[in-house]
């Protein structure tokens, strides 16, 4: 009941809702509502009570809630399913479990306040401390709910949506380091991991889902020594519910856009275009100048004696980047 009350108050954050209305919505007594309000206050939520007006959630206490997210979603997403956890192993792993249950559809999402086994690319760990970030997984494609041939440039689209969401709600100017590291002041504040469920028997992809980890207000000292000089945070006062809602809106927008439009926008955020980079290619370390990003999202790198089309891997920017 506490979560239900919190969802309703967050949906109407700043406005009063009467104890009677809450009681009728939840089919309990007003005394039960009062007791739950007191428990929420004990947890740190600032809830104001005014005679003949009711209760309202005030202050900047920031927790992920379904009501707080839904109120800012575009109309097309109002009925999407949202699952919110305090802490789980991994939102991507939970999405896989949800798919096995079957009651999940394209553009449903899982969110968590923290992850104990957050995952990044190449088997790396994505550090996900409680209540400082937003960790979510979006079901991008499910067999029978769209055409697989239209599921291209997913990672590029997601990184673009993240950059746009941050720019829409803050004064920050994010950049994207190919392929999908989203940066503020040369530090990575967002990790993206796209995975697919593949059937060996049918030789078919049955689902594609993308995990997105955002460091919103993560203290620098929390990061492990291994990533201290690479990781960063938005350090914004924007409520995480608002940021998540804007991200979901941007994801929906970019999902329907064509390649040319996506690549043109992606280039505008790129921090590798016209920069010298180093990378591994067929087991050999190479250096070159990034000349372009083509319609497939591949880097076109001029290495002097050869021009390489790079479609995967890690790149390092020469000079003032890590």
Image (spheres, rainbow, N blue to C red):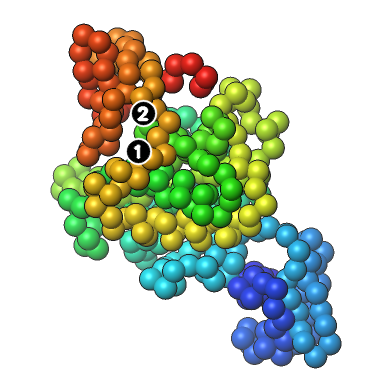
Q: Is residue 154 left or right of residue 54?
A: left
Residue 49 visible at all: yes
How far from the left and from the top, in percent, is residue 201? 17, 45
Whether pointer 1 and pointer 2 mark residues with C-beta atoms closer than 8 Å, the reply is yes
Q: Secondary structure at mark 2?
A: loop
| Residue 51 placement: quadrant | bottom right
Total label count? Answer: 2
- The residue sitting at 21% across, 9% down in the picture is 305
- The residue sitting at 34% across, 64% down in the picture is 105
How far from the left and from the top, in percent, is residue 71? 54, 71
Task: Characterize the local packing of mark 2: few (<14), some (14-19) or many (20 or more) Cα atoms within 10 angstroms.
Answer: many
How far from the left and from the top, in percent, is residue 226? 58, 22
- The residue sitting at 52% across, 19% down in the picture is 320
Up-down: is 172 above or below 254?
Answer: above
Q: Secondary structure at mark 1?
A: helix
Which residue position holds label 2? 273
Q: Is residue 145 left or right of residue 101?
A: left
What is the spatial separation of the Cα atoms under label 1 and label 2, in whole angstroms?
8 Å
Q: Is residue 159 left or right of residue 264?
A: right
Up-down: is 196 above or below 104?
Answer: above
| Residue 221 placement: quadrant | top right
């Amino acid at each position: 009941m506490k979560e239900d009350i919190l969802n309703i108050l967050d949906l109407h954050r700043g406005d009063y809702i009467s104890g009677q209305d809450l009681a009728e919505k939840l089919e309990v007594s007003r005394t039960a509502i009062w007791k739950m309000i007191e428990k929420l206050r004990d947890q740190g939520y600032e809830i104001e009570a005014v005679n003949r007006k009711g209760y309202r959630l005030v202050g900047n206490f920031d927790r992920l809630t379904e009501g707080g997210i839904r109120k800012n979603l575009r109309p097309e997403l109002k009925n999407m399913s949202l699952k919110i956890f305090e802490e789980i192993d991994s939102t991507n792993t939970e999405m896989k479990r949800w798919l096995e249950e079957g009651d999940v559809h394209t553009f449903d999402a899982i969110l968590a306040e923290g992850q104990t086994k957050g995952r990044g690319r190449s088997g790396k760990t994505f550090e996900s401390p409680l209540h400082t970030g937003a960790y979510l997984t979006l079901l991008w494609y499910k067999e029978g709910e769209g055409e697989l041939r239209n599921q291209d440039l997913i990672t590029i689209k997601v990184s673009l949506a993240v950059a746009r969401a941050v720019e829409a709600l803050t004064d920050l100017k994010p950049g994207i380091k190919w392929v999908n590291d989203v940066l503020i002041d040369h530090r990575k504040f967002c990790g993206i991991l796209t995975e697919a469920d593949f059937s060996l028997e049918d030789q078919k992809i049955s689902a594609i889902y993308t995990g997105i980890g955002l460091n919103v207000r993560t203290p620098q000292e929390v990061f492990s020594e291994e990533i201290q000089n690479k990781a960063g945070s938005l350090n914004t006062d924007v409520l995480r519910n608002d940021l998540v809602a804007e991200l979901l809106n941007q994801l929906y927008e970019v999902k329907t856009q064509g390649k040319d439009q996506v690549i043109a926008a992606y280039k505008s955020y790129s921090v590798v275009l016209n920069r010298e980079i180093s990378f591994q290619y067929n087991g050999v370390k190479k250096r070159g100048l990034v000349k372009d990003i083509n319609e497939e999202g591949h880097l076109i790198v001029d290495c002097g004696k050869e021009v390489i089309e790079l479609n995967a891997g890690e790149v390092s920017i020469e000079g003032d980047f890590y």
